[in-house]
Amino acid sequence: QVQLVESGGGLVQPGGSLRLSCAASGSIFSINTMGWYRQAPGKQRELVAHIPSGGSPNYGDSVKGRFTISRDNAKNTVYLQMNSLKPEDTAVYYCNAWITTTDGYENNYWGQGSQVTVSS
């Protein structure tokens, strides 16, 4: 079994910053792409950013220049540094990862979701 556990969400004022973390644990052989998605009320889930193992990150257009994704492979953890936050960034943020488990199968996994609210 594999678990993705998120931390770091909360309430922040416009222009502020937050950092999300997501740690993978369990029967992990390797982790390929890790990323973050978000879903605002009444909207579809959208890609925020993702980063392949050993590759360059990709960002959604709405967060380019403000958000930074990074990963620590030794800790099986992905981070999302969010700066210059706007009210429209308010959403539930979900961690996502493609993980090959020790039995040799690759599957897609999701975290539990973290609420980020940007409001004055």
Image (tube, grey):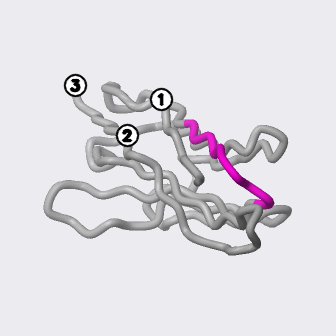
Which quadrant of the structure image shows residue 105?
Answer: bottom right
Which quadrant of the structure image shows residue 75?
Answer: top right
* 109 vs 48, nearest the viewer: 109
Q: Residue at x 46, y 66 (%)?
A: 47
Q: Secondary structure at mark 3?
A: loop
Q: Residue at x 63, y 67 (%)?
A: 98
Q: CB under 8 Å between callouts 2 and 3?
A: no
Q: Find disc 1 in the rendering and name its residue.
A: 8
Quick one: which residue is furthest to the front in this view? Answer: 103
Q: Find disc 2 in the rendering and name its residue.
A: 114
Residue range corresponding to the magenta coloring: 21-30
C-alpha gap between disc 1 and disc 3: 19 Å
Residue 24: image x %, image y %?
A: 63, 46
Q: CB under 8 Å between callouts 2 and 1?
A: yes
N-term-proximal mark, 1 vs 3: 1
Query: Does 73 sit above or below residue 29?
Result: above
N-term-proximal mark, 2 vs 1: 1
Closer to the camera: disc 1 or disc 3? 1
N-term-proximal mark, 2 vs 3: 2
Q: For this view, does 90 lie left or right of residue 21?
A: left
Q: Residue at x 33, y 66 (%)?
A: 45
